[in-house]
Image (cartoon, rainbow, N blue to C red):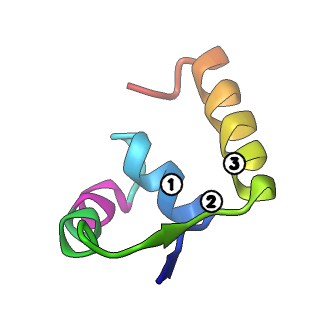
Amino acid sequence: MIFLDISYLIAFFVKREENHERAVEIAKIIKNEEKIISKLVVTETITVLKKKLETKDIH
């Protein structure tokens, strides 16, 4: 079981993030693993992604 945290999710979804390529590689490795995420992490991730969209820091 893999717990997904905000750092990983932001790196995965935001191409400009320093660890984006690594997050994509990790996604391939854990593709078939069971993943869990807390409601708090979902909320934090949405908030950060929204901020990045507002500042056009996401592509």
Q: Which residues are magenta?
A: 19-24
Question: Which is closer to the viewer, label 2 or label 3?
Answer: 3
SS class of the residue under badge 1? Answer: helix
Label annotation for residue 9: 1
Under mark 1, the amino acid is Leu
Q: Is residue 9 magenta?
A: no
Could you tell me which residue is drawn at 49 percent across and 63 percent down? 8
Distance from disc 3 to disc 1, alpha carbons, whole Å, reads 9 Å
> Circles 1 and 2: CB distance less than 8 Å?
yes
Q: Quadrant of residue 6?
A: bottom right
**Position of 52 relative to 20 (above/below):** above
Residue mark closest to the camera, 3 vs 1: 3
Answer with mark 3 or mark 1, whichever residue precedes in sequence. 1
Measuring from the top left, give residue 38's x and y in whole percent: 72, 62
In the picture, measured across the screen, residue 28 lies left or right of residue 33, that is left
- Whether residue 22 sits left or right of residue 18 in the image: it is left
Dividing the picture into quadrants, the one containing residue 51 is top right
Residue with the mark numbered 2: 6
Please state, as top left, top right, bottom left or bottom right, where the C terminus lies in the image.
top left
Q: What residue do we see at 75% from left, 35% from top?
A: 47
Residue 21 on image: x %, y %: 24, 58
Question: Earlier along the polypeptide chain: callout 2 or callout 3?
Answer: 2
Q: Quadrant of residue 30?
A: bottom left
The tally of labels here is: 3
Label 2: element kind: helix
Q: Secondary structure at mark 3?
A: helix
Residue identifier under label 3? 42
Measuring from the top left, give residue 16's x and y in whole percent: 37, 41
In the picture, the disc for residue 40 is none
